[in-house]
Image: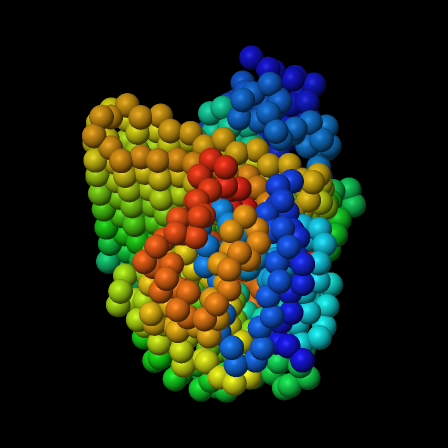
């Protein structure tokens, strides 16, 4: 086992002193959750490039940096108009804003919510109504052999709690906006989201992670999504961190009988980014659409790992991840679908497509299927390539100049993911963001 | 001045000489058919006129309304008024038909110093032409040629031509893969575009298309040269005798250069 004691030690020491202060006020179950997590972290240590799952993402820079962590710090005050740039225009939504990982009530607001629906700061609920979380927190996201989820669980402070009871439908999206500022020395935050949809509940959740300035920091986030029988969740994750920042996230999804989840992630920011998505069909009839777009330039690094566990029969998962890689950026996709022995009539499709805009960009694509059942429909595939020159010529032959043709085709490549976003104002924002990142976009924007 | 004047054109693709001295002059108002067996260079001629990269012109000249066509980028050829209907139109998911065509129309208008069209003006421009080609509104929302049948793709080519109103249309095997009904629709679209200031080069393997689009001149291309020219009766003659009647043989697929990109 690759235990790098010297690198884990600072975190273990930090936990000891943190646990002393936290223990005074926290309920026993939470203390136990933290202790188990740090124990798991101690066991696994930081992953090394020798681990198959981590061969492209070197965490040594994170392990070597002692990021500042002050569990007592509140959210620093920042002007509301700074946050405005990261919202979705006229979108009517409930919005929880967190600054450096801590809830900022003055920047947050809730719109009308159906009876019984709870949306609020995890920190506040842990303080005032910890019982509501006792049997839920840490149930979906495992901390075993998951160093970063373990650290998040050991040190978690704040985040969002969303609970939609049976049959309730939250029509307007709930936007969780995590804003980070650069601090000296660089700091770490541990956003933790817990989202519970009971029987036949419905909700739309948007997670945003943004950097207000260009400095370094580390976001280590965990989101747990428990989607009950017949429930419907639309989930979006928008990552626009500072390009000097590290963003590591674990998204854990548990799906009940006949539940339907669509989850789409957009990675535009960050310097070193690692996203792990793990989903489990706990019962029959579930459907999952798991999509992602990573649009990278300069020396950005984005590593997406997904694991879909078809544990039960009659479930469908459709997965599409697309990367657009410019300059010296590196985009990694590693997907695994496990179809267990009992999971007959599984329908699973996994696709990863990468577009290289530069000779120095790097893409690694490893789709994977492990099928233990015998009556299933499964497929996977991946591509890494350049723009189709036939398509470029076709557009040029109609009078569109070469640069615009290339921009348009790149934009269209991204469009396949963007167009799946059901929240219109978010889709428009994504259109603008993606376009503004493409070379030569001014010319085609005029005609859009 | 001739609309299109091709003189002694030699061209190669993938290090293989395909065109070995082509001479054709098309005047405004004329429809020229270019017929020939597989591998004779028909598609290469169309691609060279449209400016596809990797098609290397070795010698000869092509003048379009007196200008040096070969010196122009593909997009400038389109803006000057050349339109090629592709034998294999590409599918581009994510670029809507309407968006694409509006961008094309406005690129051409901008080049010509005309004001760009807004969405309403564009819609009124295309309305009648959609009817002419039997395209319904759902078509505009779909991705460019995305999931289109062979017939739909060809109709879309002619529709684009009708909207862009070129001075010279080059139709590359527009009849291939069309059933008789689709062929009629497409031919009807093309015929409606015939006018005294527009020229057409209709490239086809079979004379079938020429029953519907009746040419003024027919040229037979073989081995990269025009081996025979005549009026529309030449197409009828070919229909009876086949290319073998002219002493021409089909180049076998193995010997024929693979069309680039397919």
Residue B50 location, quadrant: bottom right
Q: Nearer the viewer, residue B179 or A276?
A: B179
Can you give x and y, in whole percent of width and height, for residue A336 in the image?
A: 42, 31
Can you give x and y, in whole percent of width and height, for residue A262 in the image?
A: 37, 51
Residue found at x 45% / y 32%: A367
Residue B107 location, quadrant: bottom right
Residue found at x 60% / y 36%: A363
Can you give x and y, in whole percent of width and height, for residue B60 in the image?
A: 71, 58
- Is residue B6 visible in this depiction of the protein? yes
A423 with respect to A340 (left or right): right
- Single out the residue that lies furthest toward the right: A184
Q: Nearer the viewer, residue B125 or A252?
A: B125
Residue found at x 57% / y 26%: A54
Q: Is residue A9 above or below residue A199?
A: above
Q: Is residue A395 above or below residue A299?
A: below
Q: Is residue B159 above or below residue B206?
A: below
Give the total of numbered labels.
0
Residue found at x 62% / y 22%: A49
Q: Nearer the viewer, residue A70 or B70?
A: B70
């Amino acid at each position: 086992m690759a235990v790098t004691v010297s690198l884990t030690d600072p975190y273990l020491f930090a936990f000891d002193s943190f646990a002393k202060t936290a223990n005074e006020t926290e309920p026993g179950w939470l203390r136990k959750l933290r202790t188990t997590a740090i124990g798991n972290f101690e066991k696994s240590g930081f992953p090394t490039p020798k681990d198959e799952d981590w061969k492209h993402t070197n965490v040594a820079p994170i392990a070597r940096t002692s990021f500042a962590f002050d569990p007592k710090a509140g959210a620093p005050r920042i002007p509301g108009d700074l946050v405005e740039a990261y919202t979705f225009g006229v979108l009517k939504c409930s919005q929880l804003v967190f600054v450096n990982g801590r809830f900022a009530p003055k920047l947050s607001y809730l719109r009308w919510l159906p009876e019984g629906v709870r949306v609020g700061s995890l920190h506040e609920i842990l303080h005032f109504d910890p019982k509501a979380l006792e049997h839920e927190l840490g149930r979906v996201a495992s901390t075993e052999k998951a160093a970063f989820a373990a650290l998040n669980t050991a040190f978690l402070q704040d985040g969002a709690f969303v609970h939609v009871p049976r049959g309730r439908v939250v029509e307007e999206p709930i936007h969780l906006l995590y804003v980070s500022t650069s601090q000296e020395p660089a700091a770490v935050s541990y956003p933790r989201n817990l989202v519970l949809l009971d029987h036949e509940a419905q909700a739309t959740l948007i997670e945003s992670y943004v950097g207000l300035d260009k400095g370094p920091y580390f976001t280590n986030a965990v989101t747990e999504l428990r989607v009950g029988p017949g429930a419907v969740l639309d989930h979006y994750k928008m990552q626009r961190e500072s390009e000097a920042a590290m963003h590591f996230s674990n998204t854990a999804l548990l799906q009940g009988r006949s539940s339907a989840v669509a989850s789409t992630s957009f990675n535009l920011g960050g310097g070193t980014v690692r996203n792990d998505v793990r989903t489990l069909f706990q019962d029959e009839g579930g459907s999952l659409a798991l999509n992602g777009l990573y649009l990278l330039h300069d020396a950005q690094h984005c590593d997406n790992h997904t694991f879909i566990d078809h544990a039960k029969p009659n479930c469908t998962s459709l997965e599409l991840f697309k990367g657009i890689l410019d300059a010296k950026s590196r985009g990694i996709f590693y997907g695994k679908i496990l179809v267990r022995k009992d999971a007959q009539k599984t329908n699973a499709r996994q696709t990863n497509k990468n577009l290289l805009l530069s000779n120095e960009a790097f893409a690694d694509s490893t789709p994977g299927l492990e099928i233990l059942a015998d009556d299933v429909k499964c497929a996977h595939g991946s591509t890494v390539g350049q723009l189709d020159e036939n398509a470029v010529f076709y557009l040029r032959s109609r009078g569109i100049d070469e640069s615009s043709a290339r921009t348009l085709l790149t934009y269209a490549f991204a469009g396949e993911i963007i167009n799946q976003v059901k929240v219109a104002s978010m889709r428009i924002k994504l259109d603008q963001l993606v376009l503004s990142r493409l070379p030569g976009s001014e010319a085609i924007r005029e005609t859009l | 001045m001739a609309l299109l004047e091709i003189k002694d054109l030699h061209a190669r693709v993938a290090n293989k000489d395909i065109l070995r001295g082509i001479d054709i002059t098309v005047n405004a108002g004329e429809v020229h058919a270019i017929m020939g067996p597989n591998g004779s260079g028909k598609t290469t001629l169309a691609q060279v006129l449209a400016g596809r990269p990797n098609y290397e012109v070795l010698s000869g000249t092509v003048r379009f309304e007196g200008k040096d066509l070969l010196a122009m980028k593909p997009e400038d050829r389109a803006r000057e008024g050349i339109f090629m209907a592709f034998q294999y139109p590409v599918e581009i998911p994510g670029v809507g038909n309407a968006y694409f065509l509006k961008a094309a129309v406005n690129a051409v208008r901008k080049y010509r110093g005309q004001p760009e069209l807004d969405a309403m003006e564009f819609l009124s421009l295309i309305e009648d032409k959609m009817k002419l080609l039997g395209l319904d509104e759902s078509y505009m929302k779909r991705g460019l040629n995305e999931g289109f049948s062979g017939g739909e793709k060809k109709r879309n080519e002619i529709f684009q031509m009708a909207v862009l109103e070129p001075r010279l249309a080059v139709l590359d095997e527009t009849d291939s893969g069309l059933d008789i009904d689709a062929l009629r629709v497409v031919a009807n679209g093309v015929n409606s575009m015939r006018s005294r200031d527009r020229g057409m080069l209709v490239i086809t393997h079979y004379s079938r298309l020429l029953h519907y689009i009746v040419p003024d001149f027919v040229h037979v291309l073989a081995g990269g040269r025009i081996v025979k020219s005549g009026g529309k009766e030449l197409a009828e003659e070919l229909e009876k005798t086949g290319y073998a009647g002219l002493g021409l043989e089909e180049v076998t697929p193995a010997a024929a250069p693979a069309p680039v990109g397919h």
